[in-house]
Image: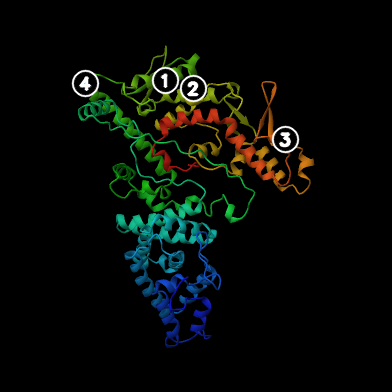
């Protein structure tokens, strides 16, 4: 509990100090001016102000703030210039103190409330007060990560309007600094605060650190040869530890409509893109700073970049990796007399396109593996791609390559081929759970899509957005179900809202029956599910388990093979910059 001789500030105390006369003179504002100067100059008093109840209650989930009173306080202050000047001077000193004296991990939670109070200052829209805003952002960036996480939780409870206004003040700061000097420290702290707000806007989604890390197996044959020789001399190994595969995405299906269970962003995520930065950014120079890990780069703060800038970065990363392997092939020949192909060359027959592509890609991996190569070294896919149709003349200058992608995807996505199903309502393709296609074929389609991205080929694919969410490890929501199977989603919504006797009306249990090549197959959604009747009390659990089975379990073999192939090509730092919709 805060211990201070100074009484915290409330709207009623401030209005009492102002008095009833709206036309009061400056001399009559001494009490209000003194109150503002003292409270905003005292860490404990300010942190205890504008509480939502008589007894201050700040928890990890809720700051206990009376934002309505805080908003009205700032509105009233703007009407009286002596009070406004006193407030600005006090905030100037407070922000300087915040910058110099960072909170510790064991700091009482209520002391974090002062950051919320000061951030609501509307004067920060004025560039004159940006030095104070910068110090405030710097202080927040210096907080222990555990305290930053609490701020994110508090921000996530904001209304859409409040979140939008705070984003606006932060974007205004970044834009002004971008146009008036572009000092790294100035941009860094504003971008960091915007990142906390980005996390709070969608707290259920994974938010990764976007440091550029060299991919496993990135270096080519010459580098591996030199490293093997060094290891033999030193008697040690420099091979990196395997990167563990991330956990599969959670299924978070809920009928809750309150904010606690929300899976809708407070504001459109595009609000975090800064138009000024994306218009004038030298993407090549920013990408270089990113891969060198030496200084500030907007790639580390990907929420600021729009889809167009990220696309340019992805293409730069592709050319950079292709260039490494192209040069390495010739350097290897120069130093060792051995020559590895500088291109990824696929020779295929039109009448046996799928099988030839699988065999060629498998052969390409074997040809590029050295005696100590890890089986998961997939960097040969980063080489420039060349396509050759057997029995046909011509050099692949891009047209043959594009035709190859169109033919392969056309066959693999054709419902007659049996790998994917097509839903007329959603006009989207989905993995066929009854498919007899091999894992290699699903892996091939993942590789093909990845190669198309890395070689700059645009394909017309009819995947629902949820496929890209799954690739990036995002959680599942009912909106995803609506994309994949709109009719099934409507049925679930009807079930969840049904007011009558669920058990005798729907006559279901915790199992799913479906037809496979003329025979009925039954799968239990949970152990003993065939004997558990669906009723009003367990219907939400039933929907959760059914969606989990439909979108995850029933297609796990097919999707995992597809993801494996896709990540062999696109599983790098540049890919992780994107949002699924991008």
Residues under numbered marks 1 and 2 in contact, where contact means CB atoms less than 8 Å apart: yes
- Foreground tag (1 vs 3): 3
Q: Is residue 244 above or below residue 180?
A: above
- Residue shown at the point (46%, 20%) measured from the top left: 358
- The span from disc 4 to disc 1 (Cα, nearest Å) is 25 Å
- The span from disc 2 to disc 3 (Cα, nearest Å) is 38 Å
Badge 2: few (under 14), some or many (20 or more) residues near its Cα, within 10 Å?
some
Helix, strand or loop at label 2? It is helix
Residue 395 lies, in percent from the top left, at 36, 19
- Foreground tag (3 vs 4): 3
Helix, strand or loop at label 3? It is helix
- Residue shown at the point (53%, 30%) measured from the top left: 559
Q: Which residue is label 1 attached to?
A: 362
The label on residue 336 is 4
User: Sequence-wise, which precedes: disc 1 or disc 2?
Assistant: 1
Q: Which residue is label 3 attached to?
A: 531
Badge 1: few (under 14), some or many (20 or more) residues near its Cα, within 10 Å?
few
Q: Nearer the viewer, residue 324 or 203?
A: 203
């Amino acid at each position: 509990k805060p211990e201070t001789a100074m009484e915290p500030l409330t709207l009623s105390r401030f209005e009492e100090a102002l008095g009833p006369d709206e036309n009061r003179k400056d001399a009559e504002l001494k009490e209000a001016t003194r109150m503002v100067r003292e409270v905003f100059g005292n860490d404990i008093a300010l942190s205890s102000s504008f509480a939502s109840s008589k007894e201050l209650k700040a928890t990890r989930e809720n700051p206990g703030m009376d934002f309505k009173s805080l908003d009205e306080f700032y509105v009233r202050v703007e009407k009286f210039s002596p009070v406004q000047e006193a407030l600005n001077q006090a905030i100037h000193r407070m922000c300087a103190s915040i910058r110099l004296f960072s909170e510790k991990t064991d700091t009482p939670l209520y002391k974090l409330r002062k950051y919320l109070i000061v951030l609501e200052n509307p004067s920060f829209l004025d560039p004159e007060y940006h030095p104070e805003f910068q110090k405030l952002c710097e202080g927040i960036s210096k907080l222990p990560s555990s305290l930053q996480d609490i701020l994110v939780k508090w921000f996530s409870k904001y209304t859409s309007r409040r979140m939008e206004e705070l984003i606006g003040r932060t974007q205004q700061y970044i834009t002004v600094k971008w146009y008036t000097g572009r000092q790294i420290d100035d941009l860094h702290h504003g971008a960091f605060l915007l990142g906390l707000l980005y996390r709070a806007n969608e707290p259920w989604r994974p938010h990764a650190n976007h440091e550029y890390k060299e991919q496993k197996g990135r270096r080519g044959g010459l580098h591996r040869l030199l490293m093997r020789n060094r290891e033999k001399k030193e008697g040690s190994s420099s091979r990196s530890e395997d990167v563990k595969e991330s956990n599969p995405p959670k299924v978070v299906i809920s009928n809750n409509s309150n904010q606690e269970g929300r899976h809708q962003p407070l504001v459109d995520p595009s609000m975090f893109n800064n138009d000024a930065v994306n218009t004038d950014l030298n993407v090549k120079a920013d990408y270089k700073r990113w891969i060198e890990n030496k200084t500030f780069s907007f790639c580390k703060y990907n929420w600021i970049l729009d889809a167009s800038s990220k696309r340019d970065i992805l293409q730069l990363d592709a050319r950079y990796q292709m260039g490494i392997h192209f040069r390495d092939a010739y350097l290897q020949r120069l130093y060792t007399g051995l020559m590895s192909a500088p291109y990824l060359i696929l020779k295929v027959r039109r009448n046996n396109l799928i099988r030839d592509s699988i065999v060629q890609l498998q052969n390409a991996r074997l040809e590029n593996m050295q005696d100590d190569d890890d089986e998961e070294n997939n960097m040969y896919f980063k080489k420039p791609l060349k396509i050759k149709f057997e029995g046909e003349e011509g050099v692949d200058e891009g047209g043959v390559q594009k035709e190859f992608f169109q033919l392969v995807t056309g066959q693999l996505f054709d419902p007659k081929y049996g790998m994917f199903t097509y839903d007329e309502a959603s006009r989207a393709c989905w993995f066929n759970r009854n498919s007899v296609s091999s894992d290699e074929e699903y892996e091939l389609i993942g590789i093909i899509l990845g190669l198309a991205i890395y070689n700059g080929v645009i394909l017309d694919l009819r995947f629902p957005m949820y496929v890209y969410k799954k690739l990036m490890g995002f959680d599942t929501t009912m909106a995803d179900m609506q994309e994949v199977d709109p009719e099934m989603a409507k049925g679930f919504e009807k079930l969840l809202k049904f007011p009558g006797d669920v058990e005798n009306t729907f006559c279901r249990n915790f199992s799913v029956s479906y037809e496979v090549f003329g025979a009925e197959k039954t799968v239990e959604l949970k152990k003993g599910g065939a004997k558990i009747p669906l009723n009003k009390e367990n219907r939400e659990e039933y929907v959760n388990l059914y969606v989990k089975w439909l979108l995850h379990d029933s297609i796990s073999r097919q999707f995992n093979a597809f993801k494996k192939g896709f990540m062999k090509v696109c599983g790098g730092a540049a890919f992780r910059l994107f949002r699924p919709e991008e």
